[in-house]
Amino acid sequence: MIGCVTMLVGVIFALAQTDLKRLLAFHTVSQLGYVVTGLALGTSLGVAAGLFYAASHALFKGTLFMCAGAVQRATGTRDMRKLGGLASRMPVTTLVWLVSAAAIAGVPLTNGFVAKWLLFDAALEAKQAVVVVIAWAVSVLTAFSFLKATVGVFYGIPSHELRAEEIHEVAPSMRVGMGITGALCVVFGFAPQLLMHPVIEPAVRSMGFDWQIQVTWLGIVTGSGTIGVTIGAVAGLALAAAFGAGAYRLVRAPAGRGTVAVFSGGEPLPVDDTLGVVDFAEMAEAAFGPIYSLNPDPLYFRIWREIRDGAAAAGRFATSRIERAPVLTALICAAVLLAAVTLP
């Protein structure tokens, strides 16, 4: 229950963010809900799924933060309302972002897909279908959130501030770092057994669980207890893909010349006929308004201010008292240490 609530709360608050790193931070909360849920299932497959998800999250979320840092370094801001159109100026960062965003959303051929697949499989094996439904819904909201971030930062129309600036890719050392972690997201998506057997299996065994999990290429679980679930899931994905392709071919408009207005189902579009970060945030606020009214930020900021003020007061005391009387300070510390050692 705690894991599922964490998933939902994190992704719902992420939807309304316009600060790129703040958006990633809320998604960290949401993704940790997946990890907690896998461990809470209490089965060998569930624990393995939770640990694999934790390792996968370290890769794709670390990559996303590096991409956000590269954007901030190149543009001087992480406010998505001021960004846009960076794909042509920062192609490497854009490519790595797309790979890691696909991973966190659970797109096939990435480690994020394998992690979610294992979790769904473990939940169904434990007869926890509600977990599967909630985790799937969170994955959809995650994909929507990163669609907003991707369009707002790397595509769309650049802001007026960026049009006049000369923006280019970050240093090769930064590109190499995020490129390596981004590539590992794909490597462990194709061959998760490279991580499962040398890392996850010993960890699961150390917790007292038997290892009866057989994971092959693309994260397919072939154990006798889960083969039916796996086959059913593969068949469902194939059917969904076939249905989507057929529907697209039926409704696809014939190729024509010129441009047409964007169809929005009757909803008004902004003046420039594009949906920006603010528009996505307004959609989220309209859908989850009651939840946003429970915003915990004021409490967190108050705690932070108290800690900051306490640290400042301690600094002033150290400067005015301790540094001016070092001998007395040493004697007091010695007395406290002696009392701590001698008292039962």
Image (cartoon, rainbow, N blue to C red):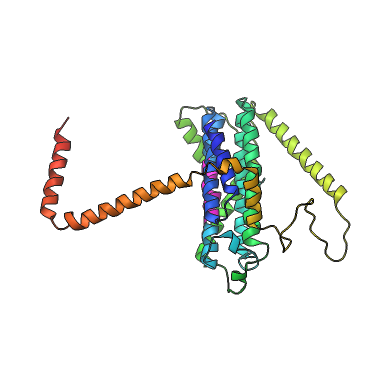
Name the quadrant of the C terminus: top left
Q: Position of residue 186 (x, y in %)?
A: 61, 50
Residue 113 visible: yes
Question: Any magenta on residue 64?
Answer: yes
Q: Position of residue 233 (x, y in %)?
A: 71, 34
* Occupied quadrant, residue 71: bottom right
Measured from the top left, where is residue 155 in percent x and y?
67, 62
- 325 vs 36, left or right, is left
* Residue 160 against residue 219 in the figure, above or below: below
Residue 321 or 295: which is nearer the viewer? 295
* Residue drawn 54% across the image and 38% down it: 6
Q: Nearer the viewer, residue 311 or 341?
A: 311
Asked if residue 105 is positioned above or below residue 69 in the image, the reply reads above
The residue that appears at 60% across and 52% down in the rendered structure is 100
Q: Quadrant of the N terminus?
A: top right
Q: Characterize the magenta stretch by its predominant secondary structure.
A: helix
Residue at the spot 13% in from the left edge and 55% down from the top edge: 326
Measured as percent of width and height from the top left, residue 260 is found at: 83, 62
Magenta highlight range:
54-65
